[in-house]
């Protein structure tokens, strides 16, 4: 058990998270720490550049990052962590896209 998560497969936190960016392995599972890093990389190096410009390379990078996220989300522990993280994000265009990726990953998991 962690400070904020009872079990790795839980999709909800035990209580509300503090307003901080960095968590440690006593507070949340390592998989969630990794998912948070992946989402940050997706946002900073994929989503922002692709939405601020129509540059082909930026769009290609976003698609590659999203493909990687979809692959990671096949793992139920990472998917649970991803869902938890989504509950902490404020609604924006990027959260809509992240939610869409979750839906895509669930559809792909069901069809295989």
Image (spheres, rainbow, N blue to C red):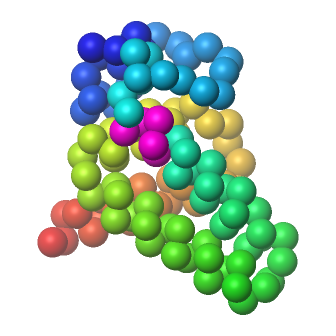
Q: In which quarter of the image is residue 68?
A: bottom left
Above or below, 87 against 82 in this view is: above
**Rendering coords of residue 105 (x, y %):** 34, 62
Q: Furthest-bottom residue in view?
A: 56
In this rendering, position of residue 105 left or right of residue 41: left
Above or below, 28 against 93 in this view is: above
- 51, 24: nearer the viewer: 24
Residue 8 appears in the picture as rendered:
yes
* Identity of the residue drawn at 65% across and 28% down: 21
**Rendering coords of residue 15 (x, y %):** 46, 11
Above or below, 70 against 95 in this view is: below
Secondary structure mainly formed by the magenta segment: helix
**What span is in magenta?**
31-35
Q: In which quarter of the image is residue 26?
A: top left
**Rendering coords of residue 37 (x, y %):** 55, 45
In this rendering, position of residue 59 left or right of residue 35: right
Name the image quarter holding the N terminus.
Answer: top left
Q: Quadrant of residue 52?
A: bottom right
* Identity of the residue drawn at 25% across and 52% down: 75
- Give yes or no for residue 34 being in the magenta stretch: yes
In this rendering, position of residue 12 left or right of residue 59: left
* Identity of the residue drawn at 62% across and 49% down: 40
């Amino acid at each position: 058990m962690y400070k904020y998560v009872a079990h790795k497969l839980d999709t909800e936190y035990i209580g509300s998270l503090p307003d901080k960016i960095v968590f440690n392995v006593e507070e949340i599972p390592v998989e969630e720490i990794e998912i948070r890093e992946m989402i940050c990389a997706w946002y900073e190096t994929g989503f922002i550049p692709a939405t601020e410009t129509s540059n082909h390379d930026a769009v290609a990078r976003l698609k590659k990052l999203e493909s990687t996220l979809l692959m990671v989300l096949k793992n139920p522990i990472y998917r649970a962590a991803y869902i938890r993280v989504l509950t902490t994000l404020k609604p924006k265009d990027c959260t809509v896209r992240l939610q869409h990726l979750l839906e895509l990953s669930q559809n792909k998991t069901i069809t295989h």
